[in-house]
Amino acid sequence: MLKALKKLFKPGETPAPHAESATATPQAAPVTRQPKDAANTESSASPKPKPKPKPKPKRDAVPRPRHQAAPVEAKPWSLADFTVEPMEGKTRFHDFPLPDSLMRAISEQGFSYCTPIQAAVLGNTLKGHDAIGRAQTGTGKTAAFLISTITQLLETPPPDERFMGEPRALIIAPTRELVMQIANDAEGLTKHCSLNVMGFVGGMDFDKQIRQLEKSYCDILVATPGRLLDFCNRGEVHLDLVEVLILDEADRMLDMGFIPQVRQIIRQTPRKGDRQTLLFSATFSDDVMNLAQQWTDNPAVVEIEPERPASENITQKVYAVSGKDKYTLLYNLVTQLELERVMVFANRKDEVRRIQERLVRDGINAAQLSGDVPQHKRVRTLDNFRDGKLRVLVATDVAGRGIHIDGISHVINYTLPDDPEDYVHRIGRTGRAGAKGTSISFAGEDDAFQVPPIEEMLGSKLECLPPEEMYLKPVPRRNQTAEEKAASDANEAEQGAAAAANRKRARASGDRQRRR
C-alpha cells in the first residue's frame, strides 16, 4: 500500500420468562424545590447571575398540594399485537419481563430481536446487577441501558416526598450531540408511560432549562458533565434520589478530561450498592477498568466483539489524491453522484469551516458541526439534516460522534483520522439499520500514512486508487448571491463569537486551576 502511494505522490445472560407487565405509577404534580446556595462552576456556557436562593426545604416539611399528572392518551393496544416468532440463536424482547407500555414503544420502534449487547445487558441488569459493557457504536447499547432503566423506574414507585430537580435516573455522556441523541431515544421509549425525560447540555439557554425543571418532575436526566455540575452547584438539581446511574462512552470522557467533573457528580449520588450503576466504553483500558472498580458494585462484565470492526453493509473506497485536489474531488462526487445525505469528516475545526463555506459558495446546501458552532445552531442543524433539509453535513470527530441518523448514504473522510478507531466510528454513521452505505476516504500526502494502521484494525486491505478523471473536473465558477453572502457573513460572525467565548472560558478555567 505504501509503495503504491509513493508512486502516486512523488517528491516536489440467560433470559427470564416474560412476566405480567408492570404498570406505570401515576406521577404527582411537581413541588418546587428551592435551590441551595453554591458557587458557580465552569461550564460550556456560564449561567446568568442569580440572587441568593432560599434554603432547601427540609424533608420532614408538610408536603405541598399535588395534583395528578395529565394521563397519556390511551389507545387500544395489546401485547398480542406485537408478535415475534422464536428463532434459534436470537433473543426476543418478549423473553424479558418488560412492562406492556415499554413493549408497545419497542414495537413502534421496529425492534424485533435483541442485539447481542442488549440480550447480555438486560439479562443482568433486569436482575438488579451493576454492569460494565464494552461495545462499539451502532450495537444497540443505548437501547439496552434505556430499556433496563425504564423498566426499573416503572416497577419501583417514586418516593412520596419528592421535590423538584430530583432525577431518579441519571445518564452522563461526553458530548452535546450524544446527550441529545440519548434523550431523543429515551423519549421514544417512554412515549406510552408517565416518565419525563430531560436533556441538559452547555451552550443552551440556562433559564429555559430551569423553567423546564419547574414544569414537571425529572425522571430521566441526560446531561454533559459541565452543565450538570452547574445545575448541582446552583442547587437546581439534587442527585440523592438517583436509582440508576449510567456512564456512556467512559473512554471518551477520559480522553476529554471530564473525569474530575464526573467524580464530583458521583459523590452527590447514593453510594454504590444503593444505586444501580452501568458503565459503557468502546475500550476496556486500565484507566476505564479502574473507574469501573471505583464506581460499580460486583458488576457483570459484558464484552461484545464484532465479527469485523466495520459493518459488512458498508462499501469502503480510498482515493489517492493530492491535497490541492481534495475539494474538487468532494464537489464532483456530491454533484455527479447526486448524493442527498452525506457526512464529511475533517480533523480540525478550521478545516471543517472552510469545506462547508466552499460548498455553500458553490451552491451545495451544507452545514457544519464543531465546537465553534453555538449549541442552539447545532441542534437546529441536526434536525435539518435528519429531516432531509440539508444535503451535506461537515463535522469533526468530537461533534460527529454519537450522531445516529438513518438514511446517510455516504461518509467521506476528507482527511484520515489520527486514531484508527475514529475511522470505524466515522464510517459507522452510514450502513445503519440494515441499509447499505458507502465510505470514501481521501488519502493525501499528509495523511496517507494513516492507511496501514486502519487496515490493521479492519483486518483487511483497502484498495487505494486514483480517482476517475471525471471526478477531477474543475469546479464551475459561480457568483454568490447577496442573500448567500449575507448568510455566510452572519454565520462567520456567529462562529467567531462562539470561538472567542470558548477561548475565554478556557482561560478562566486555567486561572481557576492555577489559583487552586
Image: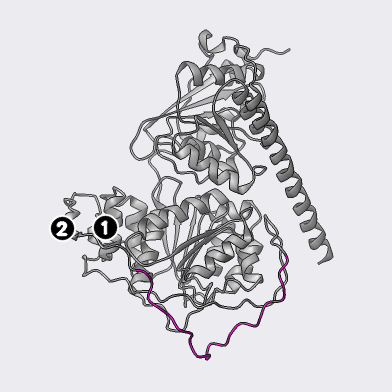
**Dot 1 amino acid type:** Arg
Q: Which residue is drawn at 58% across and 65% down?
A: 210
**Residue 7 found in image quarter:** top right
From the top left corner, tell me how far across and down residue 408 is, in percent.
43, 33
Asked if residue 198 is positioned above or below residue 39 in the image, the reply reads above
Q: Can residue 329 be seen in this view?
A: yes
Which quadrant does the N terminus fall into?
A: top right
Q: Most prominent secondary structure in the magenta stretch? A: loop
Which residue is disc 2 drawn over? 80
Q: Residue furthest front?
A: 482
Q: Residue at x 64, y 28 (%)?
A: 357
N-term-proximal mark, 1 vs 2: 2
> Which SS class for mark 1?
helix
In-image side of 161 versus 121 (left or right): right
From the top left corner, tell me how far across and down residue 510 is, in percent.
79, 57
Asked if residue 499 is positioned above or below residue 476 in the image, the reply reads below
Query: How far apart are the two marked residues, 1 and 2, measured between alpha carbons?
Result: 10 Å
In-image side of 175 versus 22 (left or right): right
Say the numbered circle drawn on residue 459.
none
Query: Closest to the observer: 473 or 498?
Result: 498
Contact check, label 1 and label 2, Cβ < 8 Å? no
Which quadrant does the C terminus fall into?
A: bottom right
Q: Magenta span covers which residues?
A: 49-70
**Dot 2 amino acid type:** Ala
Which residue is disc 1 drawn over? 104
Callout 2 environment at 10 Å: few (<14), some (14 to 19), or many (20+)? Answer: few
